[in-house]
Image: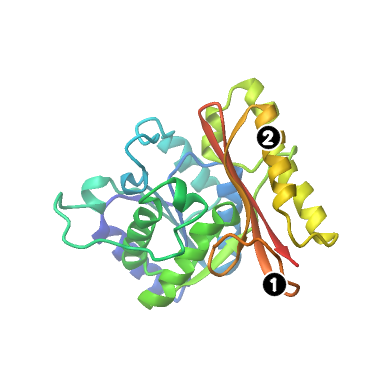
Amino acid sequence: MKQIESIDDIRAAVRALRSENKTIAFVPTMGALHQGHISLIRKAHKHADAVVVSIYVNPEQFGPNEDFDSYPRRLQADLNVCEKEKVDLVFTPDDAVMYSSSVNYFSIEIEELGDHMDGASRPGFFEGIVLVVNKLFNIIKPDIAVFGQKDIQQFQILSRMVKEFNHSVELVMAPIARANDGLALSSRNAYLSEEERTIAPALYRALRYVEKQILDGVDKPELLLSHQKDELEAKGFQNDYLNVYSLDRLAPVSQLKEGNRYILAGAAYLGKTRLIDNIIIDF
């Protein structure tokens, strides 16, 4: 395994792999790797001959009052994980490498797809993600890129970016990795206190309850969702959103129609920790 910090060097290393007729799978991360990231790396191995992982905490996707400064950074531990998982190349740029100039003449704008869910709560978040992933795709030029379903709005937006920007990369979505009690694994789970950690799986249980009712035939889930929001607040959550969204346009849906696919998604704060989760529903 090679750790590489510069764009020229990572490009040269990828070219060397391609000279051996190897296909390249790419897993972009912000580090603080956990079992969820490991599942992405293992899925990447199944889709290509060589795996490249990036570790970069992207400042462009953090708002002014978000946790950029406190976001967990454990580079050596992350490198140990990558080596154990037989990653070929680890790209670890800094801000000067990724954003060489303090003056930007171009910007990313997202129409409609970022209006709801996390996009509504975190202005500029997906613009920052699209910007950095677009850069990383141009640098690595992978055949495959693997992302997790936990960030399903991100996956759908990046899928559209790939189509509109004509990237020659196939996106693969890996299922959500969960703890034994159902909590979706996340680097931010480290912020939870011991008591909060015992409460946190209630978000997933709320989604599962609504999912069951929908699959049993409820096509107007507004009251169900309202009730579950109340239940979560009673447990100590501060709700951000809990709703059903169209899979393609990521817009709220009040009535479900047979034969369509939907995202049942929720986000809530527990203490200072923001938790997100989702379930894809075939109605």
Specify few, some or many for label 1: CA neighbours under 10 Å numbering under 14, 14-19, or 20 or more: few
The residue drawn where x is 27% and y is 45% is 94
Observer able to see residue 219: yes
Name the residue type under label 1. Answer: Asn
Give the SS element for disc 1. Answer: loop
The residue drawn where x is 37% and y is 63% is 110
Specify few, some or many for label 2: CA neighbours under 10 Å numbering under 14, 14-19, or 20 or more: many
Q: Position of residue 19 (x, y in %)?
A: 38, 75
> As rendered, which of 44 and 117 lies closer to the eye?
117
Q: Position of residue 228 (x, y in %)?
A: 72, 41
Mark 1 and mark 2 residues within 8 Å of each other at the beta carbon: no
* Residue under numbered circle 2: 232
- Image label count: 2
> As rendered, which of 79 and 70 lies closer to the eye?
70
92 left or right of 261? left
Tag on residue 206?
none
**179 versus 116 height, above or below:** above
64 left or right of 120? left
* Residue under numbered circle 1: 260
Location of the C terminus by quadrant is bottom right
Observer able to see residue 204: no
Q: Which mark is first along the chain, 2 or 1?
A: 2
Q: Position of residue 31 (x, y in %)?
A: 45, 43
Q: CA distance from mark 1 to mark 2?
A: 28 Å
The residue drawn where x is 60% and y is 56% is 149
Q: Position of residue 76 (x, y in %)?
A: 42, 36
187 left or right of 211? left
**34 versus 170 height, above or below:** above
